[in-house]
Structure formats: structure tokens, C-alpha cells
Image (tube, rainbow, N blue to C red):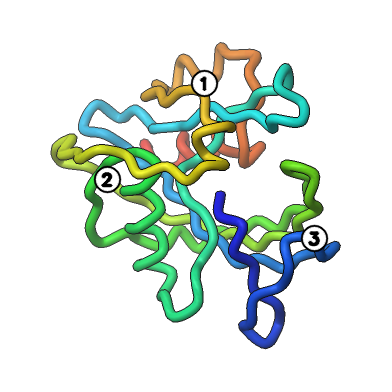
């Protein structure tokens, strides 16, 4: 997650501003075996609270959503993706992370991988502190897990995609 925030006029707001509007993109990355890639994260201010989430992040000034998604997935996972397909699904969330309140609008994209071509990750300092693991999850593993997943309706979305 990048600390780069945009206000309604497209200019950057201070990290300490409350109720930061942030445009973000997220990828449901499905491998050839039908598994989805998720990242386990935590807030370093509350390190015992962990969750799994889809790769992605904030759209920087001058980027299209596709460009932001390709950049974020590469930085966070090392995966080289092409042609993300909009899922037509969005999520509005308000949350506290690293002592900052966020108001975020996320657009979700589907990425189907044919191969697992990777390069090295390029994590930001905040990602180095807060990313714990990456895992390819099968639908069965997701359904049987007691872990917290974001978005909360992730399993039903993946069921629809894999049908």
C-alpha cells in the first residue's frame, strides 16, 4: 500500500489528513491450476491481527488503472501481468492502517496467468513491515480456512469466476 493519496482534485494530500480519498486497483490473480494469489498482511501497530488480501494498491498521478495494477502486482509479487480484465466490481472501504484513517475506492480486475513468469519484488518500506507471506489458495482451502480475507466476499467471487 502506498502512502500516496489523492484528493478530489487529483492532488496529493498529507498522510496525516483524516478521511483520505484514495483510488485503488486490486487483482484477482488466478494461476493455471485455478488457485488465487493472496498476500498475508498485518498492521505494524497491531501485529497480532493478520489478514489475507488481493495484490494491488493506489493509483498514482498520471497512471491509468491498468498501469497502476500492472505496477502494483509487479512490485508486490514479482509477477509480470498483461491485459487485466475489469470485473465490474468495486468496494468502498474505510479503515485504519499504520495510524492513518483511509477512505478507499477499489476497482477489481481479473488476471489469468498462463505461466508464472516472475522477477524480484520491489516492496516499499511499509510493505516490508506489513507483508508476511504470499500463498496460492485453492477454492477448497479458502472455504475451509478460518482466516480473514479481503474483500469479504472473495470466495463467492472466485466461485463465479471458476464456474
Give the tally of numbered discs. Answer: 3
| Marks 1 and 2, how far apart at CA | 18 Å
Residue that lies at the very extreme toward the bottom in this rendered image: 9
Q: Considering only vertical position in the picture, is 10 above or below 84?
A: below
Q: Residue at 41%, 75% (x, y): give it.
A: 64
Relative side of 42 to 14, left or right: left
Secondary element at tag 3 = loop
Q: Considering only vertical position in the picture, is 31 above or below 10?
A: above
Residue 139 percent coordinates (x, y): 44, 23
Q: Which one is closest to the eye, mark 2 or mark 3? A: 3
Q: Quadrant of residue 123?
A: top left
Q: Residue at 50%, 34% (x, y): give it.
A: 128
**In the picture, which quadrant includes the C terminus?**
top left
- The numbered disc on residue 142 is 1
- The numbered disc on residue 40 is none
Residue 39 percent coordinates (x, y): 48, 31
Residue 134 percent coordinates (x, y): 42, 26
Q: Which residue is mark 3?
A: 16
Relative side of 141 to 19, left or right: left
Residue 154 percent coordinates (x, y): 56, 37
Q: Considering only vertical position in the picture, is 100 above or below 48?
A: below
158 or 26: nearer the viewer = 26
Q: Which residue is mark 2?
A: 112
Precedes in sequence: disc 2 or disc 3: 3
Amino acid at each position: 500500500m502506498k502512502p500516496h493519496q489523492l484528493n478530489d482534485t487529483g492532488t496529493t494530500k498529507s498522510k496525516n489528513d483524516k478521511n483520505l480519498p484514495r483510488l485503488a486497483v486490486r487483482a484477482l490473480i488466478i494461476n493455471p491450476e485455478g488457485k488465487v494469489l493472496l498476500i498475508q498482511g498485518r498492521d505494524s501497530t497491531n501485529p497480532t491481527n493478520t489478514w489475507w488480501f488481493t495484490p494491488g494498491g493506489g493509483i498514482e498521478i498520471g497512471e491509468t488503472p491498468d498501469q497502476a495494477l500492472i505496477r502494483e502486482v509487479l512490485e508486490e509479487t514479482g509477477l509480470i501481468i498483461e491485459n487485466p480484465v475489469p470485473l465490474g466490481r468495486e468496494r468502498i472501504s474505510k479503515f485504519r492502517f499504520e495510524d492513518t484513517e483511509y477512505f478507499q475506492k477499489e476497482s477489481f480486475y481479473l488476471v489469468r496467468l498462463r505461466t508464472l513468469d516472475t522477477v524480484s519484488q520491489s516492496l516499499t518500506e511499509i510493505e516490508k513491515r506489513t507483508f508476511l507471506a504470499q500463498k496460492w489458495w485453492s477454492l477448497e482451502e479458502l472455504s475451509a480456512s478460518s482466516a480473514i480475507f479481503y474483500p469479504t466476499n472473495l470466495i463467492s467471487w472466485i466461485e463465479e469466476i471458476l464456474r
